């Protein structure tokens, strides 16, 4: 018996119905389901997946990676995750590792995959719905304007100097940096071209179609997406 | 009885299993399925959807929009599509309009939606898997590097001057403009950081993980995605 396959399974940003048919099929046939777990014990990707697929007979493998700001803690958690996954794969079982949103976009799966592939394991990525596509659909507006204009996806830790670049923009996970981004949007005169969705498809979802009219109050949620229209709309 | 709802249903870039559970459910309950049709009669989005969902009992509404280079022809086709959709919705039936890839990203659905919403109709977008996420998953590589680096999605008719912008890039539908893009990548010394997937998940799929080693020969396909890694990988 050879080694098992690790599947990086995208579960989308929140609505369990945004899992793909492929994600549901792969989950149904893996005996082991691995998923990120916060220090407080939360397992959001697992919560989403189990609303879409019956996981009651699965063995759940909680992994604590990539949540700490401390590099040493992150490194130790990464090594522990690799070790736990290798143990399962070495025993010949396939493992589904759940990922919020899409597994190819700002996902912690990339490094895990790199290490396992380098060690000779088979890894397969199952793409899914990104938070920015889901947010645009929730707002009922296209992400992009015309076919001449780029769409720039800006992760949390990138600055907002990209605001003045051409085209449409999606700022991801901007909860922590939201006050600064809102200020920059106001200064650039772009609030009227900007919308915000927090916790898209999750309990407590908030939708602001026009940030010049209304903005979220209080502590911004970690899962916040700000969409800024381009010029070619 | 009120008017029907128009659903913009994303079918993903090719693999029928990349439809979401939501797309499958909405398709199953709409009696009318509208889909783009080329002048030669091809209906690719429909071909993909019917491999995932039984559409044999549906009424199919072929729409010929957005395929012509001539503005007047496009405009007439757009008006005819709106008229055909309004007739269905006025009769009280819900309509699923199929879209390749994701309906919020460089989709012709945006304008149809705008016109119908302005005329008082209810429209809902069902997000899906984009071609660039599917291409990255097919290559088994993340689209993005670190969390400080943007990801720029560049449509066919945008130039390749964005090659020198920071971050990772995905060039979409670059078939027609592929020779020029490959030249520009070579001049920028980026071929070794670039990969290409043509017809991802469709018959005739081609995968080039490293464009400095091998490149597609002959006429490039319309459905071509070129992925360029960022610096933070």
Image (tube, coloured by chain):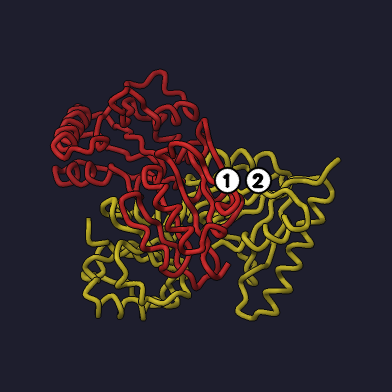
Chain colours: A yellow, B red
The residue under the point 81% across, 46% down is: A3
- The answer to which image quadrant residue B193 occupies is bottom right
Closer to the observer: label 2 or label 1? 1
Q: Where residue A45 sits: x, y (%)? A: 58, 56
Q: Which residue is mark 2?
A: A55
- The answer to which image quadrant residue A233 occupies is bottom left
Front residue of this view, candidates A200 and B169 = B169
Looking at the image, residue B77 lies above or below residue A68: above
For label 1, the crowd category at 10 Å Cα-Cα, with few meaning under 14, some 14 to 19 and many 20 or more, is some
Q: Where residue A69 sits: x, y (%)? A: 60, 79
Looking at the image, residue B179 lies above or below residue B79: below
Real-space CA distance between mark 2 and mark 1, rounded to the nearest whole angstrom: 26 Å
Q: Is residue A186 left or right of residue A203?
A: left
Q: Which chain is mark 2 on?
A: A
Q: Where residue B6 sits: x, y (%)? A: 27, 37
Q: Quadrant of the C terminus of chain B?
A: bottom right
Dot 2 lies on which element? loop
The residue at the far top in this view is: B57
The residue under the point 50% across, 50% down is: B133
Count the marks.
2
Q: Which chain is mark 1 on?
A: B
The answer to whether residue A50 is seen in the rendering is no
Q: Is residue A166 left or right of residue A54?
A: left
Looking at the image, residue B157 lies above or below residue A44: above
Q: Which residue is mark 1?
A: B138
Front residue of this view, candidates B112 and B193 = B193
The answer to whether residue A101 is seen in the rendering is yes
Q: Quadrant of the N terminus of chain B?
A: top left
């Amino acid at each position: 018996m050879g080694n098992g396959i690790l599947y990086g399974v995208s579960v989308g940003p929140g609505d369990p119905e945004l899992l793909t048919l492929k994600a549901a099929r792969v989950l149904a046939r893996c005996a082991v389901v691995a998923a990120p777990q916060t220090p407080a014990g939360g397992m959001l990707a697992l919560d989403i997946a189990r609303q879409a697929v019956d996981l009651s007979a699965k063995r759940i493998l909680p992994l604590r990676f990539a949540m700490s700001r401390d590099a040493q803690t992150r490194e130790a958690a990464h090594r522990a995750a690799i070790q736990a996954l290798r143990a399962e794969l070495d025993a010949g079982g396939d493992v589904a590792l759940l990922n919020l949103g899409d597994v190819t976009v700002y996902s912690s799966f990339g490094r895990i995959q790199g290490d396992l592939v380098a060690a000779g394991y088979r890894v397969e990525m199952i793409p899914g719905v990104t938070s920015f596509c889901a947010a645009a659909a929730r707002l009922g507006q296209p992400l992009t304007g015309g076919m001449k204009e780029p769409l720039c996806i800006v992760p949390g830790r990138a600055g907002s100097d990209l605001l003045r670049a051409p085209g449409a923009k999606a700022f991801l996970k901007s909860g922590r940096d939201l006050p600064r981004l809102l200020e920059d949007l106001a200064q650039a005169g772009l609030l009227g071209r900007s919308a915000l969705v927090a916790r898209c498809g999750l309990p407590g979802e908030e939708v602001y179609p026009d940030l010049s009219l209304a903005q979220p109050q209080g502590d911004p949620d970690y899962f916040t997406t700000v969409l800024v229209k381009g010029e070619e709309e």
